[in-house]
Amino acid sequence: MSNLAQLNLQRWIDAREGKLERTLSASQKAVRHKCFVSYHQEDEVEVRKFLEEFEVAFIPRVLGASDEDDFIDSDDTDYVMDQIRERYLTDSTVTISLIGKCTWARKYVDWEVYSTLRNDKFNRLSGLMAVTLPSIENSTKTLPDRVSDNVNGTGGYARWWKYPSSVGGLQSMIEEAFQARTSRVDLIDNSRARRMRNSSCLIV
């Protein structure tokens, strides 16, 4: 994904956040978690609509790993994952994976989820949840492998949700992911080797 496209989207978010902060009540602000949004660049129109529709529900972060990062080609997996956590996920507590047709095929989604699930003295664990985008609601859906490992029906660390119908509904989903960092931490499965390349996925 182009870092410039992500940067432009984050700037758009920040501009909206500045205005929103002046209109929200203290109680509304208190329940807004900072969430990293992981997605495929081909879904940016839907992602932007999701962020606009539910902007009251959470504080979004969208800047993620890209080919332009200077650490990407390192052979040291721990270093790469530490850099993703430090640069992009450091102030978020929940990662929302927005599922489109080809999200499963993008290696950086896998890397972002990998970093989300790390929990050691250098990395703070985040909650994880997946949301199906409307464009594939009535078609075959494929989760990224690492997300699927952690959904495991309804018995895993993460949850896979249909597109929310209300702000309150999304906030409940986010809160469950936030609480899972302590209530379901023993269910985390981050054993899969990280994806080294994008897979072929035809978007029509």
Image (spheres, grey):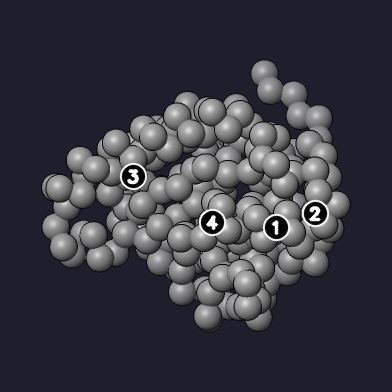
Identity of the residue drawn at 70% across and 51% down: 111
192 relative to 165 in the view: left or right? right
Q: Give the residue type at disc 3.
A: Phe
Q: Are marks 2 and 1 in contact (CB under 8 Å)?
A: yes
Q: Nearer the viewer, residue 138 or 2?
A: 2
What is the distance, in whole Å, between disc 4 and disc 3 at their CAs?
20 Å
Q: Which mark is residue 194?
A: 2
Helix, strand or loop at disc 3?
A: loop
Residue receiving disc 1: 81
Identity of the residue drawn at 79% across and 36% down: 198
Q: Is residue 173 visible?
A: no
136 relative to 24 in the view: left or right? right
Q: Nearer the viewer, residue 194 or 204?
A: 194
First in sequence: mark 4 or mark 1? 1
Residue 202 lies, in percent from the top left, at 74, 24
Tag 3: Cα neighbours inside 10 Å, few (<14), some, or many (≥20)?
some
State which mark lies toward you, 2 or 4.
4
Residue receiving disc 3: 54
Tag 4: Cα neighbours inside 10 Å, few (<14), some, or many (≥20)?
many
What is the distance, in whole Å, between disc 3 and disc 1 at their CAs?
29 Å
Residue receiving disc 4: 89
**Quadrant in the picture for residue 53:** top left
What is the distance, in whole Å, between disc 2 and disc 4 at their CAs?
17 Å
Placement of the C terminus among the 4 image quadrants: top right
Tag 1: Cα neighbours inside 10 Å, few (<14), some, or many (≥20)?
many
Helix, strand or loop at disc 1?
A: helix
State which mark lies toward you, 4 or 3.
4
Identity of the residue drawn at 44% across and 32% down: 9
First in sequence: mark 2 or mark 4? 4
Q: Is residue 90 visible?
A: yes
Identity of the residue drawn at 37% across and 61% down: 33
First in sequence: mark 4 or mark 3? 3
